[in-house]
Image (spheres, rainbow, N blue to C red):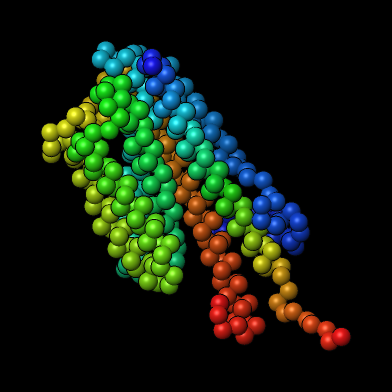
Amino acid sequence: MNESTGLDAHDATPAGDAHRPGNRGVRPGLVGGMLILAFLAAQVTGIVISPAESGMGHLQKIMYVHVPAAWSAFLAFGLVFVMSIAYLARPRESSDLLAEAAAEVGVVLTGLTLALGSIWGRPTWGVWWTWDPRLTSTAVLFVIFVGYLALRSFVEDPHQRGRWAAAVGVLGFLNVPIVYMSVRWWRTLHQPSSSPATVDDAYVWGLRINAIIFLAVMIYLVRRRYQAAKLEREVETLQEERALARGDTHV
Amino acid sequence: MSNWSWVIAAYGLAWLVLGGYGWLVLRRLSRAQADLVSERNRPSTTLELDS
């Protein structure tokens, strides 16, 4: 496997029908398959080993997906921040594409966090949604990075797109500490941040295991998304070179 | 709904979202790999024969 492009050795063979778009099956590979099993095992472990919580009962088990999804989203946006700074300091395609991949995965995880929070909020608070500081700041974070992805799709020039996206990526990340601290800074319906320091021992291991697996899933998705973007850029470059060689004025 | 129904809904949603997105990413990667191979193997010039 080529690390930069994700191409297997057999992909370098001459093209045939098997290589045409859509003719190859979607395969998660060995790592992906192991992650699926680990994801399942972590969730079963969390559900089985944790007793019913005194106030919420079994609803507490939603914590094992809600909290790790939020943490992983924060880390994905942290990666966007680092790659955006790197791009602004030294514009490199890899920084830009990695930031894009991390932003997309972060948006998916933030959307999941919000939806899981709603599922938890309805039976515990009696409402699907409330304009609570934690919920509102998380929704703002979600919208900022949806805007980041929309911006990328509007700008055609790669250098301009990279610069503008990097600026939004850096500014957007500044909302992450606000989301995290919102439960301390303002009066809120949301419970304090869950961590091994604030959660009872009976629930810590379930939370830790699920957090690690979510992190691994996040890294896997970012890596695969980055590889896809890198290959797509390579295809575009080849098509542009071919068009220039033919003498086309519009590429 | 019982407590367990909410828990099952939450876990089901997590699988649906992550599984669905993961599938989309892998499909995109697979297509990009296929496009690259077919682009690399495309003849660099087109010969046209006069009839």
**What residue sits 53% from the left and 48% below the top?**
B25
Q: Say above or below: A150 vs A112.
A: below
Residue placed most toward the observer, A102 or A82: A102
Figure quadrant of residue A122: top left
- Residue A104 image position (x, y, % from top left): 42, 51
Please say whether residue A159 is visible from this viewpoint: yes
On screen, residue B22 versus residue A134, left or right, reads right
Q: Say above or below: A80 vs A216.
A: below
**What residue sits 59% from the left and 66% below the top?**
A235
Figure quadrant of residue A236: bottom right
Which quadrant is the C terminus of chain A positioned in? Answer: bottom right
- Residue A117 image position (x, y, % from top left): 32, 31
Residue that sits furthest to the right in the current view = B51
**What residue sits 52% from the left and 61% below the top?**
A230
Q: How many marks?
A: 0
- Residue A211 image position (x, y, % from top left): 38, 33
Residue placed most toward the observer, A100 or A132: A132
**What residue sits 84% from the left and 87% below the top?**
B50
- Residue A99 image position (x, y, % from top left): 39, 57
On screen, residue A58 versus residue A29, left or right, reads left
On screen, residue A57 versus residue A198, left or right, reads right
Figure quadrant of residue A124: top left
Q: Say above or below: A21 vs A201.
A: below
Please say whether residue A99 is visible from this viewpoint: no
